[in-house]
Amino acid sequence: MVYTLLEMFREIMEAVGEEFSGLATHRYVGEIIQYHRLQASSGYRRAAEHAYQKLLDFGLEAEILSYPAREGVTFWAQPSFQEWEAREAVLHLLEPEARKLADYREIKLSLIQRSAPFEGEAEIVLLEDGLEVEEYEGLDLEGKVVLTRGDVRRVRYLAVEKGGAVGLIYDGMKELPGLERRLDNALQYTSFWWYGGERKCFGFVLSPQEGERLRRSIKGGSVAKVRAKVTSRFWDGSLEVVSAFLPGESDEEVVVVAHLCHPQWSANDNASGSATLLEVARTLHRLTLGGRLKKPRRSIRFLLVPELTGTYAYLAAHEEGLPKMIAGLNLDMVGESQELCGSTLLVERLPGSTPAFSGDLLERLLEAVAKDTLGYAGAGGYPSFRYGSTPFLGGSDHIILSDPTVGIPSPLLIQWPDRFYHTSLDTQDKVDPQMLARVGKVAGTYAYFLALAGQEEATWLAWEMVTRFKERLVRLVQEERRAGRELVKKVGRLQNQGISGLRSLRRLADIELKGFESELSSFARRELKNVPGLRNQEGVKSRENEWEEEARRLVPCRLYKGPIPVTPYLRRLGSEERERWWRLEHRYGNALWYLLPLSLYWADGERTLHEIVDLVEMETGKRAAELLVTYCRTLSDLDLLHLLQR
Ligand SMILES: [Zn+2]
């Protein structure tokens, strides 16, 4: 084995670091957040036009692509939906005292987004959260509004659709795991989203503090009455994807994506990612134009999208080009001031079903940028900010790109958690220009390196991947020595992924991988040999229940590219199935963001669902037989997945 050049990315990173401006990016954030950029709305369209104009001003090739925003259209299995806008929305308390509670003109988040028009007076009925059917027994909701802290989709269904209420007032604040946030005066971003054919209604949002005040007076026996006026409309329209292009020598592409949508202000989520993408595009254009960096082998495609929907729409419309898109990067919430927001800058790795070079490269680049502080004597190098990496957690556009049926392995750069996430306090003062500069340096180097990569770069990357494999393996063995056969299985899986990852380098260049593969495999063998008595230990027996048994009989075959959401299809389910799905959603919470896509990723038409449950458990630590059987059965009932019976 011969070591190739150390840090082949160094020169690129220096050039990008000098050209990329964190301050200018911070200024673009300030421009983007002026728009109320809900996906499929005139506010979003204006933001898209603004970004498009900037890209042209920078000298890039750019276009605005338009996709239908109306019901009855799907992008693969993702249904489209109508545009929406509100002109006016005010909520006045009339009794027990008169005061204004919410005004959309002052703050866009004071309305539940995608509210239906309404004008009238109504009494408030107090719900704790309103998630359970029993909570509604004996309540007369006809013509009233409910005050709730519960999930607005669920409450809309139970209170409005079933109970006859006319609207909702939401005064909750969602908790974030790993971070305490006491935001008594903030408004939580809420939306009725789009589920097709649901009974529409209006809703307002109050801060937890305002809500508490109202709750106290109702509990104290007062009758509370409000007057609400919402002037809003839904219509068949369009949703836009801004696409910019930095041409390379071939028709292959590296894809950088950021979602431009979200309500005003939503500065870190995701004006920060969008602004960074704009400045990366400008930086690489400038550097290649001026000759500091040569014209790369591959082109770089920059996409600003309405989150998920826009990525589905774009990829579905460019299906024949997918094999040419060799890797991607998702920039989502990257600008956080870590002090204020409590965040850590994270690389989210690729899913186990899509092992590739891109995750390792991104981690390597972030580590290089993190050595930004020199020791007392000017030597060394250590981070002045928090950073790390996490397994695949889903939740944004990379879940579509990284799906094996799409095949654009795309890690995510994100700052998480963020104390102000999805609230009215996600404002520009929480965005740190220095952090934007770091992320720009990583993202620009990543995109250009992969656009440039040929034989030499791929060989360097292979070495880097083997090194990272060894690190991970040593840690795994160290942490799970007691796991017995389970450990052997885990090592085997890591090894398979390592080898598949190496083979993905053939997308960059025709390189000889034998030496790397055998180095990787023999290292794994050596490490396992060092664990005494391993093979004699009993493995953990998997629990057998009806779900596990059923999973053994089912083989899911995919009919659509990309992950498949259930929520937009709930209307087509019977109320019992719907209730069952809600229970599972409630039980698994945000874990659905990765459990469901991961299960589809592994579905290759040969594996049984039971094997998939095992693989997902190995990857996430969660055994979800009931969830995954129900998910696949539901998709099959909806003709979105084919289920073979064994
Ligand atoms: Zn968001």
Image: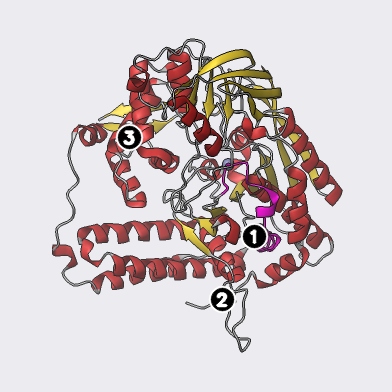
Image label count: 3
- Of mark 2 and mark 1, the one earlier in the sequence is 2
Rendered-image quarter of ligand 1? top right
Residue 376 is a magenta residue: no
The kind of residue tagged 2 is Tyr
Which dot marks residue 382? 2
- Of mark 3 and mark 1, the one earlier in the sequence is 1
Residue 426 is a magenta residue: yes
Query: Residue 253: x and y, percent?
Result: 66, 49
In the picture, residue 48 is in which quadrant?
top right
Residue sitting at x 21%, y 59%: 485
In 3D space, how far apart are the residues under numbered discs 3 and 2 (Cα atoms)? 43 Å
Query: Residue 421: x and y, percent?
Result: 56, 46
Q: Looking at the figure, which quarter contains the C terminus?
A: top left
The kind of residue tagged 1 is Val
Number of other residues with Cα within 10 Å of mark 3, as a class: few under 14, some 14 to 19, many 20 or more: many
Q: From the image, give the main secondary structure of the stretch colored magenta.
A: helix
Residue under numbered circle 1: 439
Query: Residue 525: x and y, percent?
Result: 29, 69
In 3D space, how far apart are the residues under numbered discs 3 and 1 (Cα atoms)? 36 Å
The image's colouring method is secondary structure
Relative to 235, 639 lies left or right: left
Of 40 and 598, which appears nearest the observer? 40
Residue 598 visible at all = no
Q: Tell me whether the residue at label 2 lies in contact with that at label 1, contact meaning CB atoms closer than 8 angstroms.
A: no
- Foreground label between 3 and 2: 2
Q: Which contiguous range is marked in magenta?
A: 420-447
Residue under numbered circle 3: 627
